[in-house]
Amino acid sequence: MAYARLRTPGTPRRLRPLTALAAGLGLVAGSLGLWATGGSAAADTAAALPAPDHIVVVVMENHAYKQVIGSSSAPYINGTLVAGGGTLSQSYALTHPSQPNYYMLFSGSSQGVVDDSCVDVGALQGPNLASELADSGQSWASYNEGLPAVGATDCRSGDYAQKHNPWFGFGNVPTSTAYGMDAFPTDYSTLPKVSFVVPDLCNDMHDCSVGTGDSWVQANLDGYAQWAKAHNSLLVLTFDEDNRLAGNRIPTLVFGAHVAPGSSTSTHYNHYDVLHTLEDLAGVNAHAGNSATATDITGIWN
């Protein structure tokens, strides 16, 4: 897979000219009414985000915020990712069941998906995170535990379920960018600009315990998480939905370079805001679907 050239680690995200001028004068961009050109003026302020070289997003399943955050069953998530990263204490999924939330997180819309039935592979052509990355000359991949083969479009295989892989619904996302988890590199510098990691139905906490999922994240992603801190990269951990008992409040964490350790924000965010932030962190200059009127995550960056 050919990856696009990435920015030099530590290079700040390119600011639009008026924003850069305001920063140089020591002015607060918001006080001048300066807005970024992407998304809506009301939602997308001129405040700069980091420009990470790599972003890895891992999506877990069906647990409410308090079932994970502060739980003794999740010692790695709490002791490492919460303690060393940024926590969104008021992060929310958007609907039930699982699959529509994945489409919302990936494309800013449920795309008409209302249940967990297998979708028609490649039937959709709307913008999404992967297509936006491709359009901007940047790289994308997904790492799907239990996927039978690279690009396999099986609905179900063992503990693997296509319903957690929204990229297969889009004809503008090559199936060849979908890998098994065994392809997740050990040389993290070879990762694409943005990638999603999807554990299987046991390891994502859907069918198995919080402790099982916590151990899986540690075993499979702690190496990357620790590397990310020193290599201008980020790990984002979130959940598709809650257990239907907590108003859809879910854990969402950000860990790595530019994140203030132990920070937390109580601002209300949802999947559209997470997508909007991923798009802006990646510098794609586009916002898919309802992401256009969402906001960037703030309050956790150093």
Image (cartoon, rainbow, N blue to C red):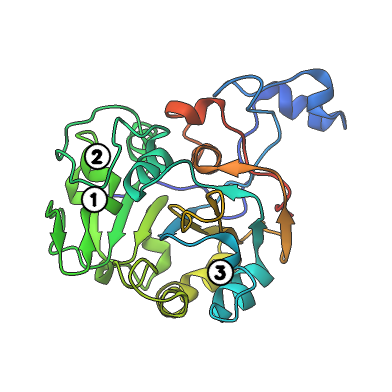
Instruction: Classify 163 as above or below 86.
Output: above
Q: Where residue 211 sits: x, y (%)?
A: 46, 80
- Mark 3 or 2: the one toward you: 3
Q: Amino acid at mark 3?
A: Val
What x and y, as percent, mark residue 131? 32, 35
Horizontal relation, residue 50 to residue 160: left or right: right
Q: Which circle marks residue 68 in the picture?
A: 3
Label 2: state its secondary structure.
Answer: loop
Check disc 1 and report its element: helix, strand or loop: helix
283 relative to 194 in the view: left or right = right
Residue 3 visible in the shown view: yes
Disc 3 residue crowd, few under 14, some 14–19, many 20+, Cα 10 Å: some
Cα–Cα gap, marks 3 and 2: 32 Å
Q: Residue furthest front?
A: 245
Kindly identify the residue that appears in the image at 42 percent across and 63 percent down.
189
Q: Is residue 301 left or right of residue 184?
A: right
Mark 1 belongs to which amino acid? Thr
Residue at numbered disc 2: 173
- The span from disc 2 to disc 1 (Cα, nearest Å) is 8 Å
Asked which quadrant contains residue 17, the reply is top right
The x and y percentages for residue 7 are 51, 47
Residue 160, above or below 220: above
Expressed as whole percent of the image width and height from the top left, the position of residue 247 reads 56, 49
| Quarter assignment of residue 47 | top right
Which residue corresponds to mark 1?
177
- If the image is split into quadrants, where does the C terminus sit? bottom right
Task: Looking at the picture, tell me which residue is in the foreground, 243 or 165.
Answer: 243
Q: Is residue 286 visible?
A: no
Res. 233 mark: none
Seen at 43% across and 33% down, the residue is 108
Say if mark 2 contacts mark 1, CB within 8 Å: yes
